[in-house]
Image (tube, rainbow, N blue to C red):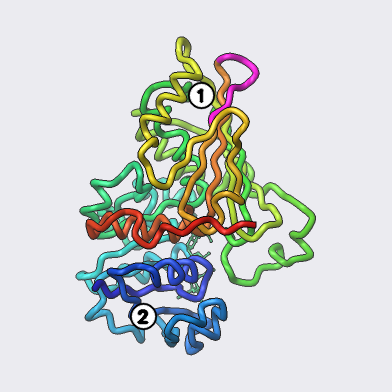
Amino acid sequence: MLNVAILGASGYTGAELIRLLHLHPEVRITALSAESQAGQTLHETFPHLAQLPDMKLQRIEEIDFTEVGLVFCCLPHATTQVVLASLPAHLKIIDLSADFRLRDPKVYEEWYGHPHHALDLQRDAVYGLSEHARADVASARLVANPGCYPTASLLPLLPLIKDGLLSLEGIVIDAKSGVSGAGRSVKRNLLFTELDEGMSAYSVGHHRHTPEIEQGLSAAAGQAVLVNFTPHLIPMKRGMIATIYATLVQGKTWQDAATSLRNAYQNEPFIELMAGQKFPSTHAVRGSNRCQIGLYRGRRPQDLILVSAIDNLVKGASGQAVQNMNLMYGWRETLALDAIPVYP
Ligand SMILES: NC(=O)c1ccc[n+]([C@@H]2O[C@H](COP(=O)([O-])OP(=O)(O)OC[C@H]3O[C@@H](n4cnc5c(N)ncnc54)[C@H](OP(=O)(O)O)[C@@H]3O)[C@@H](O)[C@H]2O)c1
């Protein structure tokens, strides 16, 4: 049995990890941390988990990590790097924050506004987009779990870029997220009255997931790729959909793109390819680790439209984290991730 601790267990991604890990035959949760909710029990913090054994939420400094093998870290960015740098060296780590996703510390500083405080850890971190990083994740000590928007964007685009099918100019990502993407802490702009019956764009042209998406695309292309990425907040609790507009390079066809996606994903347990009159939907992936990817023709022969749907809390966070743990420990990749989506 692997003993795991979840730091930041009183938030949304922490709750999802507890829900998923409870079904994992090789894992035992031995510690849960919280900050403002420390001292509460799991049942008090999350009544929907009342059928699980109750545990106290502790402050991080109260946790004894001696018998723990793996830490899932669900803390806010910036706090994360300070906390992880202070943990015992024997621990493996899967970090859900943005702190270890960007390879270049200068890019991190430019987008996050301060120097990175754990460069030793940062150097060894592996970016864990599971389907594209299996070998690296398997041997990693620290996995930087991808962001939700980057997961929804990179999964459809990477095979096409790797196969040299797309123009690297003018890729547009128009994405929408449910409100749980912003976490569980109280914020005025996330009040029901502010959100319900409305939809808004935010961080237009400068969202911090932009360099993460560009980093993945640039590595696949072997040259710098810039994208225009616009996120939107929509009045639903969970789910994310990305609509991506791209252009085929001269001489390549829609069929080439379809073949590329099929070659990359036809045997992937968590990826469902769609085309024609079948369209990705957040309803079809809700509560599951699945990603639906649709490929469609645009108005001109070289225009492609890709649409992807994930659950931001599962494939976009805790589910992919469990998938990465399964890879790190050589377990079946789908362990604890077989859940059928919740509908409606
Ligand atoms: N939500 C998503 O869809 C999503 C997707 C991908 C990645 N992520 C990333 O995953 C991380 C967790 O996200 P989340 O949505 O679960 O956030 P959340 O709901 O806001 O939860 C944050 C957790 O961190 C704890 N915490 C906050 N400040 C702390 C501090 N200074 N020291 C120790 N613990 C502290 C909170 O404890 P208390 O509540 O007890 O204060 C809570 O347990 C974030 O970095 C986020 O960017 C989130």
11 lies left or right of 204: left
x then y, percent, for residue 294 = 54, 34
What is the magenta range? 295-301
- Residue at coordinates 24% horizontally, 69% vertically from top-left? 91
Q: Residue at x 64, y 72 (%)?
A: 186
Query: Seen in the image, is 11 located left or right of residue 158?
Result: right
Measuring from the top left, give residue 203's x and y in whole percent. Answer: 62, 48
Residue under the point 35% across and 44% down = 131
Q: Quadrant of residue 321?
A: bottom left
Task: Indicate whether residue 297 is drawn in magenta.
Answer: yes
Mark 2: secondary structure: strand
Residue at 57 percent of width and 49 percent of height: 284
Please determine whether, in this image, residue 92 is positioned above or below residue 130: below
Identify the mark nearer the N-term, 2 or 1. Answer: 2
For residue 84, above or below residue 114: below
Tell how many labels.
2
- Helix, strand or loop at mark 1: loop
> What residue would you read off at disc 1?
169
| Residue underneath mark 2 | 31
- Which of the image's four quarters has the C terminus? bottom right
Q: Check contact, mark 2 vs mark 1: CB within 8 A.
A: no
